[in-house]
């Protein structure tokens, strides 16, 4: 029954990627360096996501 509520690792990574990209977008206007760092983190998560899908 608990497995019903558990998210898959792909869903978790996708949500993390979306969150990081949104934060990067918000920071782009006020702090470009922090925005670039968030984008790098998001692309690392994206690599993990693509590796899991393959």
Image (cartoon, rainbow, N blue to C red):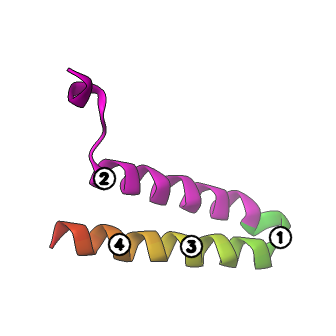
Q: Nearer the viewer, mark 3 or mark 2?
A: 2
Nearer the viewer's eye, disc 3 or disc 1? 3
Q: Which residue sits at x=57%, y=79%?
A: 40
**Vertical relation: 8 (above or below) 53:** above
Image quarter of residue 6: top left
Magenta highlight: main SS: helix
Residue 47 falls within the magenta-colored stretch: no
Q: CA distance from mark 1 to mark 2?
A: 31 Å
- Across and down, in percent, residue 42 comes to 51, 69
Q: Which mark is residue 48?
A: 4
For label 3, the SS is helix
Q: Which mark is residue 31?
A: 1
Task: Give the spatial CA distance, label 4 vs label 2.
Answer: 10 Å
Q: Residue at x 56, y 73 (%)?
A: 41
Q: Is residue 5 left or right of residue 24?
A: left
Circle 2 packing at 10 Å, graded few (<14), some (14-19), many (20+), is: few
The quadrant holding residue 4 is top left
Distance in Å between CA atoms under marks 3 and 4: 11 Å
Task: Nearest to the eye among marks 4 and 1: give it.
Answer: 4
Q: Residues within 10 Å of mark 3 (few under 14, many from 20)?
A: some
Q: Position of residue 19 (x, y in %)?
A: 54, 52
Q: Position of residue 29 (x, y in %)?
A: 79, 65
Whichever of labels 1 and 2 marks the residue nearer the N terminus, that label is: 2
User: As displayed, is residue 38 above or below residue 16?
Assistant: below
Alpha carbon separation for disc pair 4 and 1:
26 Å
Q: Quadrant of the N terminus?
A: top left
- Region rendered in magenta: 1-27
Image location of residue 20, percent across then percent down: 57, 60
**Mark 2 — residue?**
9
């Amino acid at each position: 029954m608990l497995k019903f509520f558990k998210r898959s690792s792909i869903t978790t990574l996708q949500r993390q990627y979306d969150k990081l990209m949104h934060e990067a977008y918000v920071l782009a206007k006020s702090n470009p360096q922090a925005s670039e760092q968030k984008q790098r983190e998001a692309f690392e998560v994206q690599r993990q996501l693509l590796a899991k899908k393959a």
